[in-house]
Amino acid sequence: MIRIKEKHRTFTNAFRMMAVRLAEMPGVMAQDVAEVLEIHPFMLSRWRKQYREGKFMNEATNTQVLDRETTAELKRRH
């Protein structure tokens, strides 16, 4: 049997922070954020927990502007 190594994606703290902020917007479901950003919902849940615990604040303190496509997609869903 041949094993194919799967590609492992990594995300910056700034990206994680952006995802958490999107998920905390009023009327926005975390499931929708995960789908739009193409990440697993459990990953977003873990990032939200880490955010509450202050684990990735240092790099992500700069506010990142959300791209228009992501914002439009989330608005379209609600």
Image (cartoon, rainbow, N blue to C red):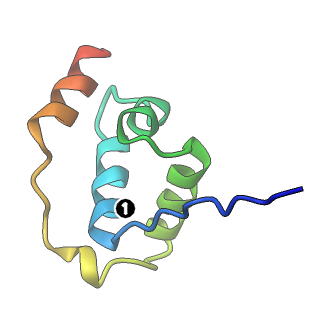
Foreground residue, 26 or 33? 33
Q: Quadrant of the C terminus?
A: top left
Q: Residues within 10 Å of mark 1 (few under 14, many from 20)?
A: many
Residue 18 against residue 76 in the figure, above or below? below
Q: Residue at x 48, y 58 (%)?
A: 48
Q: Is residue 16 left or right of residue 43?
A: left
Identify the image quadrant of residue 72. Answer: top left
Q: Residue furthest right?
A: 1
| Residue sitting at x 33%, y 26% | 27
Q: Amino acid at mark 1?
A: Arg
Vertical placement of residue 40 versus 55, above or below: above
Q: Position of residue 66 (x, y in %)?
A: 14, 47
Q: Secondary structure at mark 1?
A: helix
Q: Give the residue drawn at x 50%, y 74%.
A: 53
Residue furthest to the front? 1
Relative side of 76 to 31, left or right:
left
Q: Nearer the viewer, residue 7 or 38?
A: 7
Q: In percent of the image, x 82 and y 58: which residue is there?
A: 2
Q: Quadrant of the N terminus?
A: bottom right
Is residue 66 left or right of 8 when viewed as pictured? left
Residue pointed to by mark 1: 16
Residue 57 x/y as whole percent: 33, 78
Image height of 26 relative to 19, above or below: above
Left or right, 51 with respect to 14, comes to right
